[in-house]
Amino acid sequence: MSSHKKIINTTKTSDRRAAAGTKATRYLHTNQELNIGDDRKINNSLQLLQDIKQSSKSDWDPSHFRLFVGNLGQDVDEELLLRSLIKYPSVSKVQVPKDHKKGENKGYGFVSFSDPDDYLRCFKEMNGKYIGSKPIELKKAKSKEPATKRNRKR
């Protein structure tokens, strides 16, 4: 009977395990430490953020691809979400709904992409990654059904 030592591949760690190490800020997207390194990207993200704040829900382009971003921590706002996804050049809109009474986010958000490749790449790369204090959960966003007599709330 031969004894085989189990080989553990340490190069493929999840962000959760790596974040527990000494340089956790490398793996987290937070307001405290953000190093994009490209001034052009930062300026474009700030302009996009200004455009987002001036637009409304009806401004969503129906031809774009939307992701639902769930499990957002209370420290995440539209700016942090946008800065976390700035590496996907076709991000066209970001929304993080707020509870007007409490003044904090509702724990979810939406992101729109004009390019389907960026949409899929973001879904594959960012699902389960930490943005702020929690790992996000990405899903395909569903469009609201128009109210009819049958599905209208009474």
Image (cartoon, grey):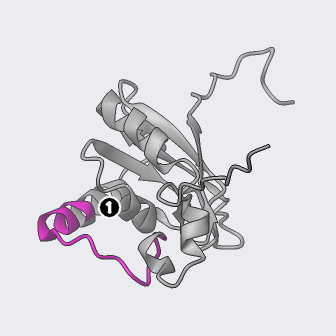
Q: Residue at x 41, y 33 (%)?
A: 120
Q: Residue at x 15, y 68 (%)?
A: 38
Instruction: State which quadrant residue 49 falls in.
Output: bottom left
Along the line of sight, which residue is nearer the eye, 6 or 115? 6
The picture places residue 13, in percent across and down from the top left corner, at 54, 59
Q: How many marks?
A: 1
Q: Residue furthest front?
A: 1
Q: Residue at x 54, y 54 (%)?
A: 9
Placement of the C terminus among the 4 image quadrants: top right
Q: Give the magenta range.
A: 28-45
Tell me, yes or no, whether the highlighted magenta stretch contains residue 39.
Answer: yes
Can residue 60 be seen in this snapshot? no
In the image: residue 92, left or right of residue 66: left
In the image: residue 40, left or right of residue 46: left
Q: Name the amino acid type tagged 1.
A: Leu
The picture places residue 64, in percent across and down from the top left corner, at 36, 30
Along the line of sight, which residue is nearer the eye, 94 or 127? 127
The picture places residue 141, in percent across and down from the top left corner, at 56, 34
Is the stretch drawn in magenta largely helix, strand or loop? loop
Placement of the N terminus among the 4 image quadrants: top right
Mark 1: secondary structure: helix
Instruction: State which quadrant residue 134 falls in.
Output: bottom right
Instruction: State which quadrant residue 115 falls in.
Output: top left
| Label 1 Cα neighbours within 10 Å, binned few <14 / some 14-19 / many ≥20 | many
Along the line of sight, which residue is nearer the eye, 59 or 132? 132
Q: Residue at x 31, y 44 (%)?
A: 92
Tell me, yes or no, whether the highlighted magenta stretch contains residue 97.
Answer: no
In the image: residue 148, left or right of residue 143: right
Q: Which residue is mark 1?
A: 49
